[in-house]
Image (cartoon, rainbow, N blue to C red):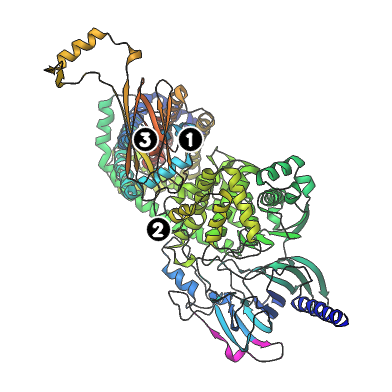
Amino acid sequence: MSILRVFEQGFQTANRRLRMTVYLWLINFIFSVLIVTPIYFLINREYSRSLAAEHITGGMDLLWLGDIIYKYQDIFPALVGWFLIPGILFSLLSIYLNGGIIGRIVAQNEKMSLANFFGDCGKYFFRFFRVFLISLLGYLIVFGVIFSIVSALLKIWTKNASSEWPLIFSSNIKFLVLVLLFSIVRMFFDYVRVRLVVENSKKAVRATLLNFSFIGKHFFRAWALYLLVGLVTVILAVIYLAVYQPLPKLGFMLLVAFIWQQAYMLSKMWTKILFFSTEYHFIQAHRPSLS
Amino acid sequence: MKNKKSTMKSLIFAFILLFLGSGLMPGEERISNVRYEIWVELDDENKKLYGKEHITWFNTTQDEVQEMWFHLYYNAFKNEKSTAIQESGEETFGPLGISVKEGEWGWIDVTDIKLADGTDLKPTMEFVTRDEPVHPGDQTVMRIRFPEPVKPGEDVHLQLEFNSRIPRTILRSGYYKNSYFIAQWFPKPGVYEEGKGWNCHEYHLSSEFFSDFADFTVHITVPEYFVVGASGKQIEAVPDKANEAVTYSFRQKNIHDFAWTADPDFIKVERDFIADEEVSRTEYEEIARKLRLPVEEVKLPDVKMILLIEPEHKAQIDRHFKALKAAIKYYGLWYGPYPYETVTMVDPPFRTGSGGMEYPTLFTAGTAILASKKVLSPEMVIIHEFGHGYWYGLCANNEFEEAWLDEGINTYSTGKVSAKAYGKGTLPISINRIPLAWFFKLPEYFDHETDRAVAIHVVKLDPITAYSWKFFNRGSYALNVYMRASTCLNTLERLVGEETMLRILRTFHMSFRYKHPHTQDFVDVVNEVTGRDLSWFFEELFYKTLNYDYGVSSLKSREKKKYVRGIFDVDGKKEEYTAKKISEMVKKEKKSDENRLYITEVKVRRFGESRVRGDVTIKLKVVFEDGAEEIRFWRGQERWKKFTFEKPSKVKYAQVDPDNIWLIDSNLANNSLKRKSSKKGILKLTTQLLCFIQNYLHFLGTLT
């Protein structure tokens, strides 16, 4: 089956799970609101009665920004913690949610409900957590070893450069390699997760090892499919920015801008589902190759 | 009669001899008290310089001078005992320290030094480390002793020979492959200050330089494949076919340093700044009116502009010249005509670490291959470094001791010139050397806004006027002498008015052109031009570490009560006014809205330690809901003051400094207080922050 056909199937599955998109968006939104709310109150308390706050409506005001950094410079470490700790918690939550997403994709003929979504979340959490731990090892090998080798090779090239060009190429090649390596590692472990659900297996290490053979056999097709979905996310981001940037951020248009932002977030949740659903269909298409 | 004639002839002869001896013609004012002729040869293979130097030093003071101190700046890169490298090890501000790799050290040896009569002075040579804290192994300052003191009005002729190893670029000067930027490279006398002795500081990590005005003739011999640029005007290029070399000679009077560069790849482009084409009659008249000078006095001369640019930046040649023209025009119109025939702009050779630095009649810019037109780079650096030709080059303050006088004034001036020539610039953000301004609409800003945003952070660390190497760290040095000083000058401009500020800077510049001004000289000019005593402004904001912050701390309006509760003597009787009684009385009167009166109380506070003085007061503007406005002034000496208003309307907001004079105020947000809160702006900011957090969390989710 061509990857375009797989993409189409994944696309249809993702569209059938729009309700799940809303769940994911809602969870992301609520979590974000919880982080932002204290900051909102802080800013509101300090600036809601100042004329300075009105300057922000006209674009970024460096004078005001300087003020706020100066005023809160002592609590910056606390602010970093404020972003970091919820970040870690949300990462754990994402592991939990992945179970629900993949579980509901695999059970595509079942009706979507909150109960069975969260049921799957709970069912697969610990397996996925083990996959996450293994994936850390994968990231370490890829970025700690392979990426370091690539960087070192590029450095040999740029060390004696006579112009800025090699540095431009090198830094962009490095970035590209970083993105591609990241996509490979992420894709690899996505397939491990999907396998665990498809096979209803609890053996994360075994699934990981078996996945080497599967990905090894179908690497370029799997990767092409993955990058195709990646391209969708890029296109969506471009569309979002093209509309958002010229929008005036005043009065009613501020509300429009906010809605547009949230529409974009919804689209990101949808692409998250699209990644898993295309991977699921790819596995299904190569079912005889499994194990 | 005959005797008289003879005496007169003798006097005229003696007068002519006196001026010829000093190199001056009758009527010509002495600017330079040093004359150099230097022959230097570049050894490209060994990265060495071999030089001969003839120095004539005129004692223009009333002191008898027994010794001479020299800067040997290249020794800053000789070993880890140098002051600069030691300071680098103690540095706490980011990765700005010096890191020298093996084989890349630089040094300078004076191999011979003698008087013109052949007297060998080498035995008297010794290194001096006088700056506190002492770094005993530093060899960047050398002292020699004369057998006889140089008397007032006399001169001394010295002949030196020196060898130096060019450092692989460490600070400002050095080489990368066969590209060179050569600065601070020759033995250079310090500045003799009458009654004080030689002012000759070591090469410090956080400091620039200080020298006397001099007349330079420099002959630079390099392999023939090099393109060379240098301070001053090239007078000849003599090829030496046998040695496949060329000797370039440059000459320039009345400058206090000499730098040069050599790179085989440079593209040399020359264009003219033709004043009549760049400045209209109306512009001359307008500036003359503002400066209260005759039009003829503000006229600009033509200038030969030379650009040495790397081939990969060829597409930006026009950008470079456009910025330089703007700089020549506005610095010239505002502060005084550019007095030299040439200006050389160098696109610094790759990895020579020499970008963004000024030398007399020559400066280095700096750009990237991928550059957005919206981002004012290289424009800002060109304007800034050319501007140093005025603030440092012509008004040659001691950068070791009062760096703000050039860096601060020039940062202020750069902001003014760039705003005039280009308007706002876009934030220079790149990813992987690709400017984001190509794809996104990034925030735009004026220079004074970014200056102020960072300046307020370092007020409590150091006074602006601290010695350069004695700042808390390099960050404090840079932000205080550049940004904070610039912000204070912008504040001063708003306080005295733009035209007055223009006259202050013009007067200061022209009064101290070819001189070594001090902070007090600047203060004196400010007081003279404004006709006010603004010394306190400098005491508070330049010499001290006091935070400036006035603001409105509380604001409320309440209806004025005609009746209040309690016991009152009414017609000889004690009568109690209860709340109920008052309510009934008010109802009876059926008071309409028009007759209501409100008491508004505004409390203004001095949150910071700094306070205004002299004839300056804190202006308070109070705006009421019916549109009425009240203005009050407060001397601002106490910690707070209450202002009370009785008006037919409630207050809308109160604002101190409504004219936005005090840019240095560390909290502009508390300058105003509205009676009712408003979510404008805050909601916008919050939604943007929310979206950022949503994306941040989503990204984290992709990693799991």
Q: Nearer the viewer, mark 2 or mark 1?
A: 2
Mark number, residue B469? none
Secondary-structure class at tag 1: helix
Looking at the image, residue A236 sits to the left or right of residue B121; the answer is left
In the displayed structure, would residue B535 be above or below residue A269? below
Q: Which residue is under mark 1? A: A233
Question: Percent x, y for residue A2?
Answer: 51, 34
Q: Which residue is under mark 3? A: A47
Quarter occupied by residue A242: top right
CA distance separating discs 3 and 2: 27 Å
Mark number, residue B461? 2
Q: Amino acid at mark 1?
A: Thr
Q: Amino acid at mark 3?
A: Tyr
Secondary-structure class at tag 2: loop
Question: Percent x, y for residue A132?
Answer: 32, 46
CA distance separating discs 1 and 3: 37 Å
Question: Percent x, y for residue B335?
Answer: 65, 52
CA distance separating discs 2 and 1: 47 Å
Q: Amino acid at mark 2?
A: Leu
Specify whether disc 3 shares its chain with disc 2.
no
Q: Is residue B131 magenta?
A: yes
Dot 1: few (<14), some (14–19), or many (≥20) neighbours within 10 Å? Answer: some
Say if mark 3 contacts mark 2, CB within 8 Å.
no
Q: Which residues are magenta?
A: B112-132
- Residue closest to the eye, A111 or B523: B523
